[in-house]
Image: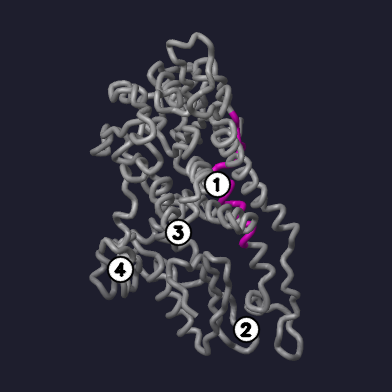
Amino acid sequence: MWVPYPLINHLSRPPQTLQGLSPLSFRTRTFEAFVLYFAKDSDALQVFDTVRELTVVGSVTHLYAFFYTPDMPISSDGRNGWELYNVQREYMRMGVGVRTKAWRLTDINKDYSFAPTYPAKLVVPARIGDATLTYAGKYRSKARIPTLSYLHWSNYGSITRCSQPLVGIKQNRSIQDEKLVEAIFQSHLSVESAYTIAMPESDPQPTLPEKPVYGATCMNVIIDARPTANAMANVAQGGGSENMDHYKGSGTTRKAYLGIDNIHVMRDSLARIVEALREGDVPGELAVDNAVSDDSGMSNGTGLIDRHALRRSGWLKHLASIMQGVLIVVRTVHIASSHVLVHCSDGWDRTAQITALSQVCLDPYYRTLRGFMVLIEKEWCSFGHKFLDRCGHLSSERFFTGGTSAADRAAEAGDEGGGGAGAFIAGFRDRLSNPAHIKEMSPVFHQFLECVRNIQRQFPDR
């Protein structure tokens, strides 16, 4: 059995068993649990401390991924996937600059000074200049302006993403931001668009269009992935949501709240799932906790998972909220031939879930292995999802209970290494165990993967 150290979610030292064995109880991030038994308590303590030292690291560069060298190259270019995603190539594949001239690539963020959490190259409406983008950036949280995420392969509908507007208590507005959104919602009206109807000047009577008209009236949607109450609460902190009286476009424009809870609610929900699985884990956890056993030495637990506990976790409800939002996007873009602008608070958690899942449903390319990798690079990595914080790659000493205390380790390090250095190392590790270090952890990407799996199971042939 091979378990990489970063997959260890929790390690504890329960009391000794009735047979005098010293157990170590492991729980992994993949919801597996197992127990190791040691004849000597000193051996168990030594293994506990070693595993903790190798799991709780101070930098991502100390993780196994930075030392692993594959036996054969991952990609034919010899770069092992680092050049798998190319911004210009991917958006040209969608048709930007090829099928339509309504969009353009801008280098306004080439040095990441405009929006540090955005890609270096952004795709924006061609009729909007960089000066307008600069002013619009002041109205969006962290300057994450509306930018193109996906252009439909047939009807020129689009998915764009951004962060929340800085409305605040004073109900601020930005003309530049409104113009940018309006240009996005009118991007299908370019000359190359399928909406264009040919009207020969010599024929005064209407003629049939040379190209098909995929939709009569656009039904554009601004999606706020947050619950309504959360969006309104952000107004007091300078944020908020769009005032629809100021945002127009071709056809009609409406706003939809998805009601997807924040990262803290999702973390608590997953914790309840893990707890329900732990309580149903037999015989390991029950035996370790000195549960009553029969004469054969086997635990008398049933191993059944409490389905009511799983239901109370709200996990499936959260996934359903995400998928309902994806359904709105897919129907708006694919069926109504319209445009969708998606955001949450900062635009790198719930927004990435909605935009990425929608593209999996809309574009067969993203349902291929290479396309799926490109999608993750584009929607998650390049647009600034906080993998380090959300996934907790560095772990925390709070997840290791029952071992040598930090004070004892500091004393030992001081005795062996001159006092000062040992105290510094122990202090650094104590900062890693601070609750503030793990409060940003949340299963955002995990939810995305589970939604993809659910879609795959429901539509195995698509």
Q: Quadrant of the C terminus?
A: bottom right
Answer with mark 4 or mark 3, whichever residue precedes in sequence. Answer: 4
Mark 2 or mark 4, which is nearer the start of the sequence? Answer: 2
Residue at point 62% right, 52% down? 269
Q: Earlier in the sequence, mark 2 or mark 1?
A: 2
Q: Main secondary structure of the magenta part?
A: helix
Front-most of residues 88 and 62: 88
Residue hosting label 2: 17
Which marked residue is nearer to the observer: mark 4 or mark 2? 4
Label 3 packing within 10 angstroms: few (<14), some (14-19), many (20+): few
* Residue at the spot 43% in from the left edge and 70% down from the top edge: 5
Task: Measuring from the top left, give residue 393's x and y in whole percent.
Answer: 41, 59
Label 2 neighbourhood size at 10 Å, few (<14), some (14-19), many (20+)?
Answer: some
Please tell me whether mark 4 sits on a helix, a strand or a loop. Answer: loop
Dot placed on the residue nearer the N-terminal end, 1 or 4: 4
Helix, strand or loop status at disc 3: helix
Mark 3–mark 1 distance (CA, rounded to whole Å): 14 Å
Query: Which residue matches tag 4?
Result: 73
Q: Nearer the viewer, mark 2 or mark 1?
A: 1
Whether residue 270 is in magenta: the answer is yes
Q: Is there CB contact under 8 Å for labels 3 and 2?
A: no
Which color mode does the image show?
Answer: one colour
Q: Is residue 66 magenta?
A: no
The answer to whether 211 is drawn above or below residue 34 in the figure is above
Amino acid type of the residue that numbered disc 2 sits on in the rendered structure? Thr
Q: CA distance from mark 4 to mark 3?
A: 16 Å
Amino acid type, callout 1: Cys
Q: Which residues are magenta?
A: 256-274
Residue 233 in sight in this render: no
Q: Quadrant of residue 415?
A: bottom left
* Image mark for residue 361: 1
